[in-house]
Structures are given as C-alpha cells and as structure tokens.
C-alpha cells in the first residue's frame, strides 16, 4: 500500500447532513461544495451541463448533482436521501442531502441518524420558518452535536448585515430550548459560492470562517463516547483450521469506550466475567480497541457467547431491562398500534416487543407535548413505552447513539416502520 493511499485511509471522516425548507438551496449548496473543492470529475460536469441545458438553464444547475430521482429533477425538489462522498487534503466527508418537505420527515431522520454535524439552510428572504424549527428540533433529538446555520441567498437581500443579524437572533431565541451546545452561523450564496469554499468580498462585515473551513476543522473526536465500553457481539469466529484449532473469537464493532488486552470484562446476559486475551483485526493484533473500530476479541475463558450478547466493563454496565421508554419517529403509512407487536433490532440483538403505552406526541413546530392525540402516524414523533420478549442491554440515546437506538419492523411485511431513541 502506498503512503498516499495509507494517508487517505487514515484521514478523519466527517458525516454531515443538510436540512432546511423547500427551495432553500440544500442540493445547490452540496453541488457548490463539490464543484469549488474540485471533487467533480470532468464527465460528471459534462453531464451536468447537458442536463442543465435540457432544463432551459443558461448556467450549470449544481442541484442536479444530488437530485437523482426523475421526480426530483422534474419538480426541482429533494424527495429521497442522497449521499455524496468527497475528500479534501484535510478530511473525508459523507454528505446526506435530506428532503425539506414535511411529508419526508422520516427521510430526514434516516439521513441525519449517523451525522456528526447538521447544516441547516435558511432562505435570507423568508427567515426562520416552521421547517427550520422542525429540522433543528430533529437534529437536537438525534443528538447531532454540531449545527451550522447557513443563511443562504444573501445575494437576494443585497448581502444585508442587518437582515443576517435579524435571522441569527431569531434562531438563537428558539435554540435555547434545544439540546445542542455548538451552533454556528455563516452568510452564504450557494448559487454563486459566497463564503461556501472561498471567502466573499461582498460580506466584509462578516469576519467568521467559510463553511468549508468549519467542515474541515471542527473538532469531532470528543463526540464519541470513550468512557462507557460496549461491544455487541456480531459473529463468533471459529476457523476450524489446524493452525487456529482452538481459536474462538468474538467479532463486532466497538459501540463505545475502549477495550485493552488484560481488561476485566463482564458478559451480558450471563453475567460471567473474564479477561481480554487478544484483540485482532485484518491488519494485525491491537493492544487497544476503541469506538467505532471493528475487531475480533478473544477471552481467557471459554464461555458460551453468541450474536446479540454484549461485552462490557465489570464496573460500568448498561441498563438491562425488558421495559423501555422510546422517542419514536414513525415511517409507515399504517399508524403505530397500541398493544401492537413488532420485531425490533437493537445493536446486534433481534427481539420482539409490544407497545404498552403511547404517552404523547410532539408538535415539532412548537415543541409542545400533545397528550390528547396519541395516534402516531407517518412522520410523527412521540414517546412510547414498549416491553420486549427478552431483556436488552441499552444506554440512553443521549449517552450512546448506538446502544441507545433501535428500529421497529413489521413482522408481516418485514418493513422498517419506525426508528426509536431510548430515553
């Protein structure tokens, strides 16, 4: 492997999502990021120019880079989540371009569920609207640690500093209700590229960084939970070969904390304890494993462990229970059924559950709890209590986004019908 390739693989990865109301310019912003950072191949650019001409546009429509569905291109909107990958000399990126329409809230939740950062666009002409508040709340609910508010289309308000400050102050008054510590603001024009990758001479009153500078330099290493050690077992490795005759390893991805050779660990659900004997990867043995590495561990003792079990620290264990309170975002046209039975996937564990109680529904435009309307339909968010057929081992979603999340599956159709964040 060359040094260049090794350096690329070792670069830090930032996952971010875009959100905002309809026509705020999310897809155009991503296209501008890719275009100005030289992340578009010539053949892609040629195709883009041809598609723009067919739509009657004299300029290259950068939004077409992410709007891939025919219906999206015909209507000029984003319907499904579109992922784009690119890199700069400083960092690798995965972008999730999510829809702005209310009826596609479920798609926004899907795209933002793994993000380190959310870029929320606001049209400078319209200011903070209901969808802005809706997406900011969802970003907070999903525990996205960093939010960048891009006040877009500044060219249409003559790059007015007064208008920019008015929008920032309006959002700040709302954001005090959110569980987000890091919120930043940038005035941009996605169409023309002002303050996206390069600084703009039209906003001399703005002395902050460009959006690309924030994406390249924002500190995300502390976002991972490196305190609470969690290792869900995905697969038991038994090579059955002469040179590995007695090898019994437990493969999976570290969901939190760190594990070191010699650590005392407990095994759930049995409660047995042992010590870590080795930590193996495709690249060789490790002394230390940390989230989100995928590794295979061996233990000093032969203990019956299978997929769905979890290795944790003896003195730091998750909650073990069959009764779980969950904030759920519903994905399916059929409403959630009280006393309904669903399959759930939690880490590597597959269990069944029953909905015991629907406590309330959230009005995401006002953040008020509606205790009267307990019917959770598609794109609704609410709090429910479930009981599982066997105990699961979990943390709150606020503490760990992997061990604190689960998905609901309709057993009749095998459709994923909801996403849950454990309270």
Image: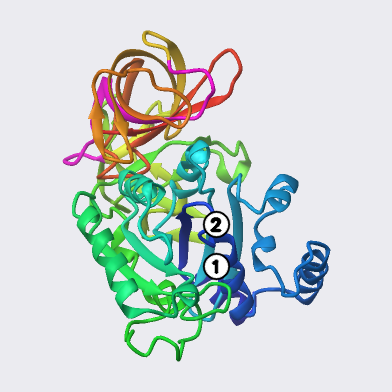
Q: Residue furthest left?
A: 315
Instruction: State whether residue 5 appears in this view.
Output: yes
Q: Is residue 379 left or right of residue 356?
A: right
Label 2: state its secondary structure: loop
Residue in the picture at 69% in, 73% down: 40
Label 1: state its secondary structure: helix
Instruction: State whether residue 268 appears in this view.
Output: no
Looking at this view, is 402 or 152 the one in front? 152
Looking at this view, is 334 or 202 the one in front? 202
The boundaries of the magenta stretch are 313-336
Q: Position of residue 112 (x, y in %)?
A: 45, 49
The residue wearing badge 2 is 23
Residue in the picture at 24% in, 47% down: 228
Q: Residue furthest top?
A: 339
The residue wearing badge 1 is 29
All told, the count of numbered labels is 2
Q: Is residue 370 left or right of residue 27?
A: left
Q: Is residue 311 left or right of residue 37?
A: left
Where's the N terminus, which quadrant?
A: bottom right
In the rendered image, residue 303 lying in the magenta stretch gets the answer no
Q: Say few, some or many: other residues with alpha carbon within 10 Å of mark 1 (under 14 / 14 to 19 / 20 or more).
A: many
Quarter assignment of residue 282: bottom right
Quarter assignment of residue 23: bottom right
Looking at this view, is 169 or 182 the one in front? 169
In the rendered image, residue 319 lying in the magenta stretch gets the answer yes
- Does residue 54 lie above or below 176 as drawn? below
Q: Position of residue 31 (x, y in %)?
A: 62, 68
Q: How far apart, in angstroms, are the residues tagged by discs 1 and 2?
A: 11 Å
Where's the C terminus, which quadrant?
A: top left
């Amino acid at each position: 492997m060359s040094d260049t390739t090794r350096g690329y693989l070792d670069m830090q990865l930032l996952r971010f999502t875009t959100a905002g109301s309809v026509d705020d310019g999310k897809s155009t912003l991503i296209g501008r990021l890719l275009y100005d950072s030289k992340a578009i191949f010539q053949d892609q650019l040629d195709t883009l120019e041809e598609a723009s001409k067919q739509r009657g546009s004299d300029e290259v429509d950068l939004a077409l880079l992410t709007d891939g569905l025919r219906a999206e291109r015909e209507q000029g909107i984003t319907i499904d989540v579109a992922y784009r990958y690119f890199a700069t000399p400083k960092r690798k990126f995965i972008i999730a371009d999510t829809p702005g329409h209310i009826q596609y809230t479920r798609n926004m939740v899907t795209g933002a569920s793994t993000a380190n950062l959310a870029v929320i666009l606001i049209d400078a002409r319209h200011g903070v609207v209901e969808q802005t508040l809706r997406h900011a709340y969802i970003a907070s609910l999903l525990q996205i640690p960093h939010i960048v508010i891009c006040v877009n289309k500044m060219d249409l308000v003559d790059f007015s500093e007064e208008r920019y400050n008015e929008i920032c102050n309006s959002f700040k008054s709302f954001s005090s209700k959110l569980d987000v510590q890091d919120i930043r603001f940038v005035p941009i024009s996605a169409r023309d590229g002002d303050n996206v990758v390069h600084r703009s001479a039209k906003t001399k009153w703005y002395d902050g960084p460009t959006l690309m500078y924030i994406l390249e330099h924002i500190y995300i290493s502390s976002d991972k939970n490196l305190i609470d050690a969690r290792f869900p077992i995905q697969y038991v490795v038994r090579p059955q070969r002469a040179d590995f005759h007695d090898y019994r390893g437990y493969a999976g991805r570290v969901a939190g904390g760190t594990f070191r050779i010699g650590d005392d660990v407990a095994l759930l659900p049995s409660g047995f304890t042992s010590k870590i004997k080795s930590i193996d990867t495709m690249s060789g043995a490790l002394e230390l494993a940390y989230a989100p590495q995928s590794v295979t561990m061996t233990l000093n003792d032969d203990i019956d462990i299978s997929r769905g079990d979890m290795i944790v620290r003896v003195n730091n264990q998750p909650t073990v229970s069959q009764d779980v309170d969950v904030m759920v975002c519903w994905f399916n046209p059929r409403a959630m059924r009280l006393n309904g039975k669903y399959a759930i996937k939690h880490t590597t564990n597959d269990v069944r559950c029953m909905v015991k109680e629907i406590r309330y529904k959230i009005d995401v435009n006002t953040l008020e709890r509606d205790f009267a309307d307990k019917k959770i339909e598609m794109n609704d968010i609410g709090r429910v209590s479930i009981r599982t057929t066997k105990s699961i081992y979990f943390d709150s979603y606020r503490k760990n986004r992997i061990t604190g999340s689960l998905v609901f599956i309709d057993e009749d159709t095998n459709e994923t019908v909801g996403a849950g964040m454990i309270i």
